[in-house]
Structures are given as C-alpha cells and as structure tokens.
Amino acid sequence: MKRAYVTLVRAARSVLGALGVLHLLDRLAHRSRTALWVRSWFSIYDLEDLLAFDVPWWTFRSADEVEEFLRRTPGAAAFEWGSGASTAWLGRRAASVVSVEHDLAWADRMAPVLPDNARLVAVPPGPAWPGGIPSGKPGFSDLDFTNYVDAIDEVAGPLDLIVIDGRAREACLDKAVDRLAPGGLIVLDNVDRARYRHAVAAQGDRIDVTWTRGLTPSLPYPTRTALISLRTG
C-alpha cells in the first residue's frame, strides 16, 4: 500500500510540476505552513527535495518545541536512531549530532548532505538470535538490532537531545532514558503505534510526556510525536 501511494504521489508531482503548481507551492511554502505541508506531500521519500524545506519528519508542533529547546540549550549534543531530513535539521541547530542508521543504502544517500557537525554511523542488523533485540516492523522479524540499539554506548557523556525514529524503538527508549542529560529531551516519533505507547507507559513515573498530534511533513494526515523528559522531584 505504501509503495502504491508513493508511486501515485510521484506521478502527481510530475503533472503538477509541468503545470507550474509546484513552483507556486514552493513560493508559498516560505510564508505559509499549510502551503509547506501540502508541498511536502510531493517530497515523500525524496531526501533532496525535503531538505530544501528545512523540516524534520515529525509533527510541526514537536519540531517547534524542539527548536525552542535547542535555543535554550547552547552547545547541545544530539543523538538519533534513524537518519533523514531531521539529521540535517538538527545539524543546523545543535552543536553536534550523531545519527545511527541501519540501512546501508540510505546511509550512502545521507552522507553527502550532512553538515560538518553531524556524524553518521551505519550499523546494519544481523540475523535474529534468542536474546537479541527484534524490530516490531513487519518484514524485520528475522533480524537482530542489538548492535544498532547499543550504538549509543559509543557516544560519550549525557546527551541533551535523543531522537528515536528508526528500528527497535522500544529498546531504544530504554537506552535513551538512561543516557539523557538532566533537563534533556527525547523525541519518540510515530506514537500512533500502540507498541510505542506501551513502551512509554512501561517507563512509569521516571518520565514526563507531552503528546503532540497534528500535521506532519510529507503525510496528508495527522500523526503523533511524543516529547519525553526525565521527571524531577
């Protein structure tokens, strides 16, 4: 279904481009978030096109809150599981970014567009084994993501911002909570999915959560992104 949708959108993009509609949306996107949102539909899975709009692929509200957080946190160290437009976006706003990517082909596409303060680490999954870390995404059940999840252990110090937007997100959340700096922020995307909400609930009273729901770049329907901080007091 997703592949058919992407094919349809790209066909529509060709038609709208020929008619000059995309050019109009490009001009409006710099002045109107609604126009930016509509224009971004035609950038789905097109990295270079989406990068031009300088938006991460989270809800607009969560991106606004993260941007404000980074303004208040000079010298912020960011880490993310799952690279993409967010990696370049973070590189423009944080002091440093380390991004872990499981897809080697995607990592090759990302490498040329990264800012100098962003480092991409490719950690492909291995074969599944008893005691390993699986991914709940369909088609990934025979793979192990232990090394991918544990890649955060190779990054020094507490981390101010941790983004979870790749595979095995439940296990990544467990790691992230332990590595977050006091006053830091975790971004957990796509929490429409029940397994991610259950993972958040499993953290109990260790965390506070802001659930954002709304428009999201590249998608013609609202989604949810969770912003998570350590509970104090």
Image: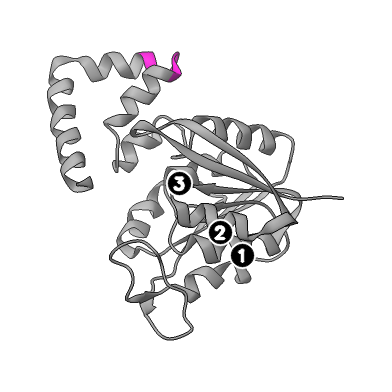
Residue 126 rendering spot, x and y as whole percentages:
37, 78
Instruction: Count the marks.
Output: 3
Q: Is residue 73 above or below residue 99?
A: above
- Dot 1 or dot 2: first in sequence order is 1
Q: Residue at x 68, y 37 (%)?
A: 69
Amino acid at dot 2: Ala
Percent across and percent down for residue 85 are 43, 43
The residue labelled by disc 3 is: 190
Residue closest to the eye, 228 or 65: 228
- The reply to whether the C-beta atoms of the residues labelled 1 and 2 are less than 8 Å apart is yes
Q: Which residues are magenta?
A: 28-33
The percent position of residue 91, horizontal first and vertical second, equals 55, 44
Which circle marks residue 174 in the picture?
1
Picture residue at 12% right of the left edge, 24% below the top: 15
- The residue tagged 2 is 199
Kind of residue indicated by mark 3: Asn
Residues 142 and 20: in front is: 142
Tags 3 and 1 touching, CB below 8 Å: no
Q: CA distance from mark 2 to mark 3?
A: 12 Å
Q: Is residue 31 magenta?
A: yes
Q: Earlier in the sequence, mark 3 or mark 1?
A: 1
Up-down relation of residue 17 to residue 182 (above or below) = above
Say if the magenta span includes residue 32.
yes
x and y, in percent, of residue 58 in the image: 47, 39
Mark before the other along the chain sequence, 2 or 3: 3
Judged from the image, the secondary structure of the residue bearing numbered disc 1 is helix
